[in-house]
Amino acid sequence: MARYPTETLKLWKKAKQLREQYYIDYARAKDKGGIRWSGSAWALDAIPEGLGKDVYLLTGEPYAASVAHDPKFNKQCLDAAESAGFARDLCAYMRSYWGGIYINKYLWGGEFPKPDFNFQTQICCSHSKWYQHASRLEKVPEFYIDVGVGPYKDLDESRLMYVTNQGLESIEWLEKVTGRKFDDELFIKAVKNEMRSTSLWAEICTLNKAVPAPLDEKTIFSLYVLATLNKAKQWCADFYEELRDEVADRVKRGIAAVPNERCRVLSDTQPPWAFLKIFRYLEEYGAVSVGSLYTFGLEGIWETKPDGTWGPRTTPMAKGIEMNTREQAMRLYADWNLSKPQFQHFYDPRIKTEMMKTMVREWSVNGVMLHLNRGCEGLSMGIMQNRLGLAAAGIPVMTYEGNMGDDREFDLVRTQNRVDSFMETLNLKREFAHV
């Protein structure tokens, strides 16, 4: 039974077009004499932007997630990686990406577009090995920046400068391998774009505290991904500004993502991309997944506000802090990225538990769904400790097993049965609002 008005997101088509254009631009970059590079969604995107206005990036995880949404093509990629001797318990995204190189096929048609270099950060256990092997297969140069310096609450001058100096060293390397002169103005502009993008995304997620929620997580998956593609580009920051305004308008008018909302849940880690229908199944109970630490904090940059609530981190620009030199910008850029919420739980699962408890409280959440994701060791690390910590706080929790990038490890019927049981504990019955 509908309780709230709903309508299609006006910017939905534009978001889809931006994503498609991103992958096309990368594939065709060499036709225009441009530079192509690859790295993860956590790579420091703004640094290579100093090489020129014709620099194009392929982020590995979002690309592999798109591959995972196409089970037939993904099977070719996974089979190729396994035939090369790589075990199924490795990062599913990494295997899909490697597989694409082995079979030399690009999801959007043609041969796999070879980058000019790989440029990567290291915090997840697979990050550097992913691009080390890709670089060997593609025979391209590689550079890695270690950002594993401990939780942000313990950041000191030596740790900050450790990352800052690596960023500055990478500029010399980029000039050497590309033969281009690094433009500090382009780099500083890119840093500002990234700060705008990631603060705006956090602001958009904050708007989902409203009841009814203006966005559901299945929709959020298609929106947060733009920051994972290239958050340092002007188009990304500008789009999020437009999106922020539209979502704020939805809140003002009481527009709901799920018209029969009567229960709010929080999810965790990447979803099983081939089975996003599980989020529509929740809606049959009037349950809306309002987000997750993953969708909020993978690219969103947050801070605790004076009133104690979680909100978007204030940019240096808004504080009137100048960025006139390469060194100033790199230091601020390193500090900004090291505060990323999803970085924190790599050091202690209790940090993640506390962040999730904050989200349960501030987003008016009734229960939490934890995906025991065998495809990502990094974001699933400590997840059972998270379950215990949430349960100890009196928060209803359910778990389900799966794999974000390997559909062979997800059982839809079994997961729906677990959802049924969980909804029963929340005193909800199916309304069949969405079939």
Image: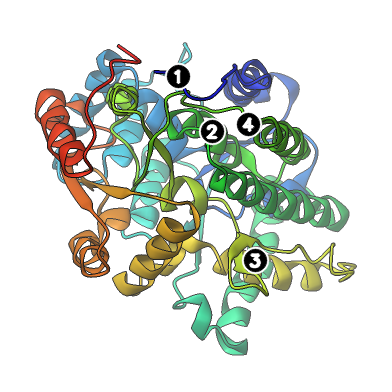
Where is mark 1, residue-wise? 2
Judged from the image, the secondary structure of the residue bearing numbered disc 1 is loop
Find residue 171 and report its image quarter.
Answer: bottom right
The residue lying toward the viewer, choosing from 61 and 197, is 197
Q: Name the amino acid, label 4.
A: Gly
The residue lying toward the viewer, choosing from 218 and 331, is 218
- Horizontal and vertical percent position of residue 374: 19, 45
Closer mark to the observer between disc 4 and disc 3: 4
**Distance between the Cα atoms at labels 4 and 3?**
33 Å
Where is mark 4, residue-wise? 254
Find residue 62 and name its label.
none
Q: How crowded is mark 2: few (under 14 residues within 10 Å), some or many (20 or more)?
A: many
- Could you tell me if the residues under marks 2 and 4 are in contact, i.e. CB atoms within 8 Å? no
- Horizontal and vertical percent position of residue 72: 26, 13
Judged from the image, the secondary structure of the residue bearing numbered disc 3 is helix
**Distance between the Cα atoms at labels 2 and 4?**
11 Å
Where is mark 3, residue-wise? 336
Judged from the image, the secondary structure of the residue bearing numbered disc 4 is loop
- Could you tell me if the residues under marks 3 and 2 are in contact, i.e. CB atoms within 8 Å? no
- Could you tell me if the residues under marks 4 and 3 are in contact, i.e. CB atoms within 8 Å? no
Where is mark 2, residue-wise? 215
- Horizontal and vertical percent position of residue 269: 34, 47
